[in-house]
Image (cartoon, rainbow, N blue to C red):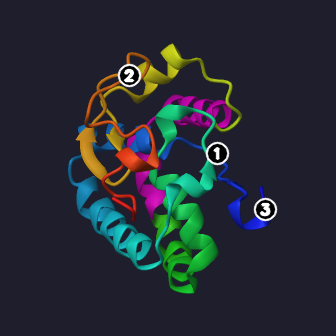
Amino acid sequence: MNAKDAKKTALCNTCTLKLVEIAYGRTPEFRLFREPLKLGMRFLSRMYRVNPSDYIVRTPGCFGCVRFHKTALKEKSRLFRLMNDLCNPLFDRLLERIVTEDEVKSAKAYARAASNGEVAPADAERWMKGLPVGFNDKKRDGISDGGNAETPRSPDDDPNHPRA
């Protein structure tokens, strides 16, 4: 494998996706802040041709997560880095007002284990159940049973992938 084909690692310190779903359930108004940010990331990801399959995914349920897009945009876009530096601290403060400290600790523990490939498939399925797939707003059903047509497993199955 040459350097161009080498996969990158996207480290995840917190499963923000899980915390966001909790926040949406408790404070629906949180969507008014997050959804425009997500839309901007989606636009920039397409503009910069972000490819989530460029990253090592040690927990299959994490494929296509917004984290991979965010990591790539930090590498590729000065505009994104500037916007992230401005918006991310506010996003974090708002989110931490909604979710509990225990939920944050749990999301951190899961993310670190998932990044290291230490999450059993059944545990990943339980954690990811009902969460959206990347920028796709469709919810996950199952993972270990092969999932469903709405849950991408590879870049070829991902409707947001540049080749799709």
**SS class, disc 3:** loop
Picture coordinates of residue 158 (x, y %)? 36, 49
Q: What residue is shown with label 2?
A: 146
In the image, is residue 105 part of the stretch drawn in magenta? Answer: yes
Q: Residue at x 39, y 62 (%)?
A: 163
Quarter of the rendering occupied by the N terminus: bottom right
- The CA span between labels 2 and 3 is 32 Å
For the residues marked 1 and 2, what is the alpha-carbon distance in whole angstroms?
Answer: 27 Å
Q: Report the mark closest to the observer, 1 or 2.
A: 2
Badge number at residue 114 = none
The image position of residue 76, as x and y in percent, is 59, 78
Q: Start and end of the magenta stretch?
A: 91-114
| Looking at the image, residue 120 lies above or below residue 92 | above
Question: Mark 1 or mark 3: which comes first in sequence?
Answer: 3
**Image quadrant for the C terminus?**
bottom left
Left or right of 159 in this view: 68: right
Magenta segment, principal secondary structure?
Answer: helix
**Residue furthest toward the bottom?**
79
Identify the residue under disc 3: 2
